[in-house]
Image: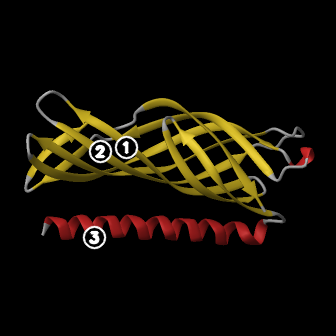
Amino acid sequence: MRKFLNFEMKSVKSVAVIVLIIGFCLVLLPNTSRAEVGIGGKYIGEVPFLIGSLDFNQFGIEAGRGMRFISIGNELISGRASLTYYLVNGRYYFPTDSQLKPYMGGGVLGVDANYTATIGRYEATFSGSSDGYDIFAGVELPLESYGFPVTVFGGIDYLNFEGITLEYEGLGIVCPVSMGGTTFHIGAKYEF
């Protein structure tokens, strides 16, 4: 029953995020004179993400997936964690006469974790997930005027995650894979 409820909660969160994005787009489309679509990559701290973005004048939305592997263990137990991250956020671009486009925004950041532990010749796989939020500010520099359809960007982030509780046959362990506090983001996107 617990797995069913967990699946149901994830489905509700996914539907809520999709409805939010569609609603955001429907509100902005009639009021926009210019829309840009972008694909690219960025790092948030040590985690690489593949991203897609949609910008309307002074507003933008972004979604992405990231992946990271971590080896965790000691003399007694060894293991490898596979972490799959997702993000959905919105941003506001401040009006400026400069090529630099300062922005600020926030959104949802989540992680699904799988940890395979080895004790001697025994192996067990634990899994779990956690959601958090990301509040950020930064600056974009479009390189169109230099002949490149690419925009580079970077800034600071405040992230907050709960620790992940990994489950295995009713047993739970708290895994310190949470990211909390201040970090950075840096990346580039191709816009068309």
Q: Residue at x 85, y 49 (%)?
A: 148
Q: Quadrant of residue 79?
A: top left
| Residue labelled with disc 3 | 8
In primary-sequence order, the first of circles 2 and 1 is 1
| Residue labelled with disc 2 | 81
SS assignment at label 2? strand
Q: Residue at x 36, y 48 (%)?
A: 83
Q: Residue at x 31, y 41 (%)?
A: 162
Q: In the image, what residue type sits under mark 2?
A: Ala
Locate the C terminus by quadrant: bottom right
Label 1 Cα crowd, 10 Å radius (few <14 / some 14-19 / many 20+): some
- Percent across and percent down for residue 65 are 49, 55
Q: CA distance from mark 2 to mark 1?
A: 6 Å
Q: CA distance from mark 3 to mark 1?
A: 27 Å
- Percent across and percent down for residue 122 are 8, 47
Does residue 26 appear to the left or right of 119 in the view shown? right
Q: In the image, what residue type sits under mark 1?
A: Phe
Q: CA distance from mark 3 to mark 2?
A: 25 Å
SS assignment at label 1? strand
Does residue 69 appear to the left or right of 25 in the view shown? left
| Residue labelled with disc 1 | 69
Label 3 Cα crowd, 10 Å radius (few <14 / some 14-19 / many 20+): few
Do we see residue 176 in this rendering? no
Circles 2 and 1: CB atoms closer than 8 Å:
yes
Q: In the image, what residue type sits under mark 3?
A: Glu
Q: Nearer the viewer, mark 3 or mark 1?
A: 1
- Percent across and percent down for residue 32 are 79, 65
- Percent across and percent down for residue 152 are 73, 42
